[in-house]
Amino acid sequence: MKNFAIIGLGGYIAGRHLKAIAETGNRLVSALDKNDSVGIIDNYFPNADFFTEFERFERHLDKLRRSENKIDYVSICTPNYLHDSQIRFALRQGADAICEKPLVLNPWNIDALAEVEKETGKKLYNILQLRLHPSIIELKKKIAESPKDKIFDVDLTYITSRGHWYFASWKGDEQKSGGIATNIGVHFYDMLSWIFGDVKENIVHVYEPKRAAGFLQFEKARVRWFLSVDYNAIPDEIKNTKQRTYRSITIEGNEIEFSDGFTDLHTTSYKEILAGRGFGLNDARQSINIVHNIRNSKPIGLKGEYHPFAKKEIEYHPFLKR
């Protein structure tokens, strides 16, 4: 049985980590969050120590480090801009780190973390759960077996509605979240690069607080992509079913179905990590490069191979205009 600590217990994704720790037969010893709305912990580890102040949490972990109850893994479920610092903290505490996506905001942060791994001898693992989805694994195999000169035409559409709270939170602050492409798109870019190979071209057509669209040329695919957090962007036929999320990936016009099975992928990720097969720094590198380049590119407008959803003009509140 391994001992876990978690940073960011109050966030929505922490519940999947708690479930994964429990379902893999391990225990949560300590948890940290600046907010105390963390009653979910009682469903899994009611005896875990909880802290709202980092200094007391750090002192507690340091005490454990000197005992037979040292922490083996620190799970990081905090806002994106904090990941880099908290990963380094975990490794220097003598624990391996398990971090939510995006691993970091900038490519050079990956190189810095590689140095800390060398210094400490500890390992960082990134949750890249789509690589473990059976439908995605099957698709990767199919693409690998296709003719070497075959280039696939792919459309990625992901609309996940968010209310006004989103832009009042850290998620709406690009300095903290990395913006829309980083915050809601990074795992899709990871999946695409895992399946279709290295990026050859990265063009941004639209980049706004609520939506972004662009084109990615991979070794084996031409990808038109569209991301949005705006309910108004959802197709009417989907709205009529009362759904607030629309997710679609088509390859050569054929829909790839992978809607089911998401809830168990964190537990699968933990099983892989505990077996020494988790995804590390280099696995995350290309997706971090992609979102960094999107964030720092000048949109060219509706030119070339743009996603058809980018045509729809949506009027936003003035404070959301870039």
Image (cartoon, rainbow, N blue to C red):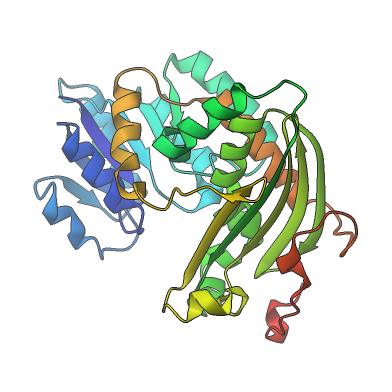
Query: Residue visible at 12% across and 55% down?
Result: 42
Query: Residue visible at 15% across and 45% down?
Result: 48
**Residue 58 lies in what quarter of the image?**
top left
| Residue 70 position within the rendered picture, expressed as x and y whole percent measured from the top left | 22, 25
**Residue 317 lies in what quarter of the image?**
bottom right
Give the position of the N terminus as an image quadrant. top left
Q: Is residue 224 left or right of residue 253?
A: right
Q: Is residue 101 left or right of residue 18?
A: right
Q: Nearer the viewer, residue 225 or 79?
A: 225
Q: Nearer the viewer, residue 169 or 187?
A: 187
Query: Residue visible at 72% across and 31% down?
Result: 220
| Residue 247 position within the rendered picture, expressed as x and y whole percent measured from the top left | 52, 59
Tally of numbered discs: 0
| Residue 268 position within the rendered picture, expressed as x and y whole percent measured from the top left | 31, 34
Give the position of the C terminus as an image quadrant. bottom right
Q: Nearer the viewer, residue 50 or 205?
A: 205
Q: Is residue 23 left or right of residue 175?
A: left
Q: Is residue 42 left or right of residue 138?
A: left
Residue 175 in sight here: no
Residue 238 in sight here: yes
Position above or below: 133 against 297: above
Position above or below: 23 against 243: above
Query: Residue visible at 62% across and 38% down?
Result: 192
| Residue 105 position within the rendered picture, expressed as x and y whole percent measured from the top left | 62, 44
Position above or below: 136 against 81: above
